[in-house]
Image (spheres, rainbow, N blue to C red):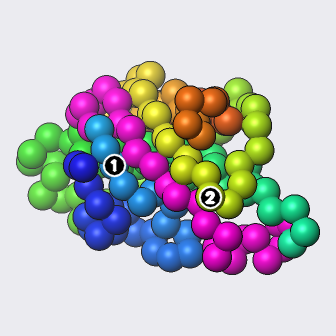
Amino acid sequence: MIFNVVEIQEILPHRYPFLLVDRVTTLDKGVYLEGYKNVSISEPVFQGHFPEHPIYPGVMIIEGMAQAGGVLAFKSLSDEDQEDAKNKVVYFMSIDKAKFRAPVTPGDQLIYRISVLKNRGAIWQFGAKAYVEDKLVAEAELKAMIVDK
């Protein structure tokens, strides 16, 4: 384990029920992050999506991948910039090439695999993939920017 949920909350501003990364298991600064989210039937989203046939929404998978990318961006900052990170936030800029390949249901563990495609200053571009076990369930290219709060 690299970061548990308490440590992730020190990096990201998100909180329950919108914190969508439970743990980071691999981090190679400026290159790659792997982490996961355990999908539980007790999550509020399942009250309406769909009560008789619970499917975890694709937009939540994309948001979880974006949050994992935010952790990767923040933890890739220089030591000097790490000091200032508490005064910064990551804004989601764009989603491209999003594809949903299989449904995600309660009891699944969503594994996020995030790769840096490009970084120029405060702007980060990620290749993001989500898996359940070894099956690709979603993918997208995500762009984000680190800005002052």
Q: Which mark sits nearer the N-terminus, 2 or 1?
A: 1
Q: Is residue 134 above or below residue 106?
A: above
Q: Which image quarter is the C terminus in?
A: bottom left
Residue 132, percent from left and from top = 59, 40
Task: Specify whether 77 is left or right of 100.
Answer: left
Start and end of the magenta stretch? 27-50
* Residue 144 visible, this angle: no
**Residue beneath the point at 56% across and 29% down:** 134
Determine crowd level at label 1: few under 14, some 14-19, many 20+ residues with C-alpha closer than 10 A: many
Q: Is residue 77 above or below residue 11?
A: above
Magenta region includes residue 122: no
**Residue beneath the point at 26% across and 64% down:** 7
**Residue beneath the point at 45% across and 34% down:** 114
Q: Secondary structure at mark 1?
A: strand
Q: Please give the label number shown on residue 107.
A: 2
Q: Amino acid at mark 2?
A: Gly
Q: Nearer the viewer, mark 2 or mark 1?
A: 2
Determine crowd level at label 2: few under 14, some 14-19, many 20+ residues with C-alpha closer than 10 A: few
Residue 129, percent from left and from top = 56, 32
Q: Picture quarter containing residue 130?
A: top right
* Residue 60 visible, this angle: yes
Task: Specify whether 63 is left or right of 51.
Answer: left
**Residue beneath the point at 62% across and 58% down:** 107
Q: Amino acid at mark 1?
A: Val
- The residue singled out by tag 1 in the image is 24
Q: Please give the label number shown on residue 38.
A: none
Could you say which is closer to the camera, residue 86 or residue 40?
A: 40
